[in-house]
Structures are given as structure tokens and as C-alpha cells.
Amino acid sequence: MMAEIVGLFNKPINVRVVTGCVLSLALVATPAVVARAEYKPPEDQKTPDKETRTNSGTTRGCDGGDIPLTVLASQNYVGRTTSTHPTFAWFVPDSKSLELKFTIYSRGSDGNFTEVHSMSLQSSPGIMTLSPFPEGEPGLLVGKDYVWQVVILCDPSAPSSALVDRAQIEVVEMPPDLQDKLDNAVDSAEKADLYAEAGFWYNALDEALKLAEESKLGVVASALLEDLAKWEKPKPSQELTEEERESIEKRMGYLIEIANVAR
């Protein structure tokens, strides 16, 4: 089945619906643990496709709040995971529950984006997390990267008012030396540290959020988000327009704000 989606990357693209399933919202509440998980992206990090960047700050929350809908991942490079069943997280600025759509796309050899997973749910304020692929069922493929997107419909009758944010994710093999360290880790805080130091953003954030209260970041994830904000700063050699640089700088500020308000 083919469907034309307008506005996904600010232009029409053809999307082929491949599969869909009932997904579960994973909000884990456990006591916060004090730790410092310092995140540093890998030196060979990929630059994301220009089409996947959103213009952060052009649209705030549906209620007009100070912080926009924000996915908790880099938009200046492609974040990595070793999991074919990763957890995704984002910040919802609005206090009221609204219709939300979560979608994962893969890019084909022809340059078109293929929808590989999608679900609708209701938003909740603060930090939302989602593990869209149940264990035991097929997930993402190692060696591929994907675009994941969150859309909140402020007014279903006015699609142009929707809040949109997205990022890219790359699935890679687990390094054997890292696996050995993880096997000896005693808790999620230590695992978050190990993943963060190895440059696996999505794994590190997943472990950190296991230590947080529902809809919160907790101490470890807040520290990670502050690290992410620091590494979002564009390099002078990057070919970016002035508008793109300003958008990234705004996003850096929002990530720090979220780290503080959602702690």
C-alpha cells in the first residue's frame, strides 16, 4: 500500500507501509541512583541526512510553552545502539493528553523513506519512553540506520499545527570487550556509564531511565542529556547554513532545560 505523506521532511515523499503491530509504552519507575554517566559520541560518528533535521523552536508546545516537543537524541549526528529492540524517549511540553504518532522509517536505495513501524497513542507530560518492538519479535536490523519521528496533533483538524521532532539511529554489533564489561556490571547505573563511555547513546539512556521515576529523567539521565547538549555543538568544518547552526544552538539550550526541569 502506498500513501503520500506531506510534511514528513517538509516535502512530499512516498511511503510504503511494510508492517505494524501493537506496541507497548515502557515507563519504568525505580529509585534514582546517584552516578555520573559521561557520554562521548564515537569519533567515526555519521552525519544525519539533512532532511531529518527539524527546525527546533519554530513551534513550541501546543499550549505555547517555552520548550518544544524534543526527542532525546542527537540531530547533529547519528546516535548508535547495539540493540535491535531499542527504547526511544522524548520530552512532551504540554500538560494535557493529545493524540501522538510514533513512526520509524528506513531509507531505500532509491532515496525514498519506507515506513517500517508506526503506532498511535496519547501523550503524557514530561518524559515519555517507548520500546516499540516486543522481545521475541523482529526488530531493527544490525548494520542499518533509521529515522524515528514523533508527531503530536495539537488540533487533528489542522495538521499544520502539529508538533514534529525526529532523529536518526544506527544499529551496530555489540563490541566483545564492552559485552565483557557489561556482564560484570552490577546495576543499570554502571551499565549506563559503560554504554556512555563507549558512545552508545540509546543504550546508555535506556539504562539511565530505568533508574528514574515515571515521566522524569532522574540524576543519571539528566547528566547524559547535559553531555548530549555539549556534543551537539556543530564543528566549524560542518557545512551548515546560518539557520541550521542557530537551530542546533537552540536545541542545545532546550536539552539543558529539559535536563533541569525533568530531573
Image (tube, rainbow, N blue to C red):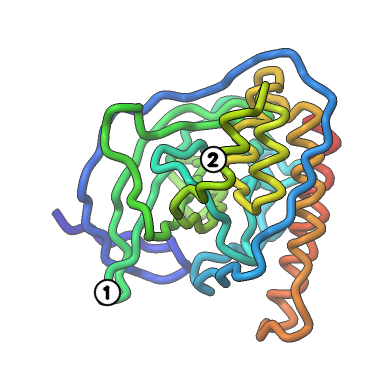
- In the rendered view, tell whether residue 245 sits above or below residue 56: below
Position in image of residue 18 (x %, y %): 20, 49
Position in image of residue 3 (x %, y %): 22, 57
Position in image of residue 134 (x %, y %): 35, 28
Q: How many marks?
A: 2
Answer left or right for 38 relative to 5: right
**Which of pointers 1 and 2 indicates the residue nearer the eye?**
2
Position in image of residue 254 (x %, y %): 78, 50
Residue at image coords 76%, 43% = 224
Which of the pair 143/253 is nearer the observer?
Answer: 143
Query: Which image quadrant: the C terminus?
Result: top right
Element type at mark 1: loop
Check disc 1 and give the amino acid type: Ser
Which of the pair 93/181 is nearer the observer?
Answer: 181
Element type at mark 2: helix
The mark that comes first in sequence, 1 or 2, is: 1
Q: Give the residue pinned by disc 2.
A: 179
- In the rendered view, tell whether residue 32 sits above or below residue 65: above
Which of the pair 231/104 is nearer the observer?
Answer: 231
Instruction: Using the rendered view, name the quadrant where residue 217 is placed.
Output: top right
Q: Give the residue pinned by disc 1.
A: 109
Residue at image coords 48%, 50% = 149
Residue at image coords 71%, 22% = 212
Answer left or right for 137 relative to 71: left
Tag on residue 147?
A: none
Check disc 2 and give the amino acid type: Gln
Label 1, label 2: how far apart the Cα atoms are = 32 Å
